[in-house]
Each structure stands twice: as C-alpha cells, then as structure tokens.
Amino acid sequence: MFYPDLATQCQVDFGPSVRAIGWLSAGHPFAVGSVEDDFVDRLRTHIAGAWQPCVTAGRHYCEFCPDRRVGGNSNVWFPTHHIKYVAPELIVHYIEYHCYQPPDEFIKAVMSCPP
C-alpha cells in the first residue's frame, strides 16, 4: 500500500504528528541513493524488537521483486519530541535491494532513537 514519504497517514497510524516513511508501491516513484551502513544496522535492530501497537492481517510482499517472495507484516514507530515516523519492516529490503533513500529527517530520527 503506497503512502508518500512524510504523509500524515499510513496503513497503521494517522494524525498531524505522524509521518509515513517507506510505504512504497510499484507505479509510484521514490527517492534513490545510498545510506550509511550504520543507519541500516540501527534500523534493522529497531525492527527486530519493534513495539507493535496494532497487528496486520497478513504479509505484504515486495512489489519490485519479480518473484515477490520477500514479505513482511511488522511495522516500526520512531518517536521524536513532536513527530512519530512509521515505517513497514520491508523498509530495510527496499534500502538494500532497491536503493530506496529515506528522507534525511527520518535517518536522523532513527540514529537518535534509543533502543
């Protein structure tokens, strides 16, 4: 399900303090580029132990992979003082395999978020 980066709603949350990140879908352009390995490692660690205030009713599969075998059903919230960023667990896959580049403000929020 597609939501543009920094939208105030996504599949699992909405409101003026919400920012959607990494809700990619085929047919919608997204930013590409490189990110630091430390960021990806930190993101992966957060996702592995993510607090899940809601449960999804099934897996979402990567729409960019031809065999669509890569999927996920978890989401992760990164709160700051004023904003909460919400991303699907597939964000790591999108970064590593499809060169997705999240917004800089999200990268900063992930890097400053305690475990």
Image (cartoon, rainbow, N blue to C red):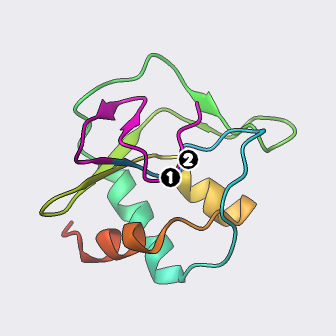
Foreground residue among 28 and 51: 28
Mark linked to residue 5: 1
Q: On the picture, is 89 further left or further right than 114?
A: right
Question: Which of 4/37 is in front?
Answer: 4
The region drawn magenta spans 1-18
User: What's the residue at 31%, 33% (across, down)?
Assistant: 13
Is residue 75 found left or right of 100 in the rendered image? left
Q: Between 29 and 65, which is closer to the camera in this rendering? A: 29
Q: Secondary structure at mark 2?
A: loop
Q: Mark 2 touching mark 1, by CB under 8 A?
A: no
User: Which picture quadrant has residue 75?
Assistant: top left
Task: Classify 10 Å Cα crowding around label 1: few (below 14), some (14-19), many (20 and above).
Answer: many
Task: Give, as a three-letter code, the residue at label 2.
Answer: Leu
Say how many tags the image has: 2
- Single out the residue that lies furthest toward the top: 57
Three-letter code for the amino acid on which mark 1 is drawn: Asp
Q: Is residue 43 above or below residue 37?
A: above
Residue 85 in the image: x percent, y percent? 32, 53
Residue 93's label in the rendered image is: none
Q: Quadrant of residue 81?
A: bottom left
Q: Position of residue 62 (x, y in %)?
A: 69, 39
Quickly name the residue at label 2: 90
Residue drawn at x 64%, y 55% as measured from the top left: 94
Is residue 58 a member of the stretch shown in magenta?
Answer: no
Q: Quadrant of the C terminus?
A: bottom left
The percent coordinates of residue 80 (x first, y second) are 18, 63
Q: Main secondary structure of the magenta part?
A: loop
Q: CA distance from mark 2 to mark 1?
A: 14 Å
Residue 24: give x, y in percent of width and height: 62, 44
Q: Residue at x 55, y 26 (%)?
A: 59
